[in-house]
Amino acid sequence: MTLQHWEDLLSVIAGNKLDKPAIGFIIDSPWIPGWYGVSTIDYYTNDKIWFDANKKAIETFPDVMFLPGFWSEYGMCTEPSAFGAKSIWAEQNLPHAAKIISDISEAKNLKIPNVKTDGLLPFMISRLRHHEKSINELGHEIKFAVTRGPLNIATFLMGTTEFLMAMAMYPEETQKFVILINDFIKDWVEYQMENFPDIEGILMLDDIVGFLSNDDFKSFAKPYLKDIYSTFDCKVNFFHNDAQGIITAQHLEDIGVNLFNFSFEHSISEIKELTNNNVAFLGNIPPRDVLAQGSIEIVKKETRSMMESVEDQSGIIWSCGGGMPQDVKTENLQAFIDVINDYH
């Protein structure tokens, strides 16, 4: 992220309208390898390919904020690997982590990983260390610590159905499990900040919160999300949940979130109202059905419709309702950008 993009981001979060509309996307391994023309395996294992692919993205679309920017990651295997989860790789698709427990009673045997030594975490840090100078020479800085959220990690380790059932049947044991993961996340964020002092933001991703009732959200999600964000004095507390976001949105301000990426199934105006217009947004045309699979004409039409539907356009970074999906073509992304830039 360039310093100008960072300043623009802070201005949007402050509720200001920029002279030129802000455009931004969460980009990582679902999109970049295919767009760049390499396999997912090569993207993860060849640091030069990783760097060159990200470099091409920022140079092809210089006006776009790519968040978090030069994201060093190994898909959904990143955090689970530190707990000992087996990573299962594919040539063209995202890897996935194998479960390490099948019952909540087994969670008590888990220990907090050492973020300096365990799983894929040291490789993430090393990749950024090796390329930090080159990133800086491009006019960009490493501004975000990135982590999956506690419930998201819990479901990778245990299974989504099993974890949600445990919440209902064994709440005390489940709370202890979430606390363990929460403590790990704080260690992981802190370690990223220790290595890269330019970090001034946190990006946390957790779609599982979208499956919870309001009571369960307040019990199993809100206290831990709030604890993580409040532990660090960051200028940008960015949260991604592109599952159901109505309940999440109502608690964001209290949690300390000031930037929210949410599902395209909710309108920007609806989420603005639920957050009392005190949170900035990244959204929200459909990522797959429009941005990836739509024609250029459909992308333009849906983008105009999105902008026209919002009366108060302050506090918005125009994007899709979720991360950048696979198979988004340069032409479609450019069509989105053109409509935003030409809108009056």
Image (cartoon, rainbow, N blue to C red):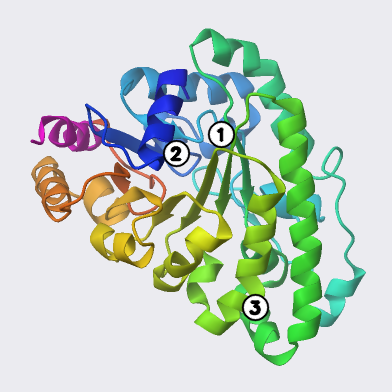
Residue 8's label in the rendered image is none
Q: In this view, does 255 lie above or below 75?
A: below
Q: What segment carries the magenta color?
A: 331-344
Q: Do the residues labelled 1 and 2 touch (CB within 8 Å)?
A: yes
**Quarter of the image holding residue 7?**
top left
Please state which amino acid type lies under the numbered disc 2. Answer: Ile
Q: Residue at x 66, y 24 (%)?
A: 128
Q: Residue 343: within the magenta?
A: yes
The residue lying toward the viewer, choosing from 48 and 248, is: 248
In this figure, which residue is indicated by the disc labeled 3? 219
Which amino acid, by three-letter code, is at mark 3? Ser
Residue in the image at 55% along x and 68% along y: 208
The reply to whether residue 257 is in sight is: yes
Q: What residue does disc 2 label? A: 27
Residue 260 horizontal/vertical position (percent): 43, 52
Q: Main secondary structure of the magenta part?
A: helix
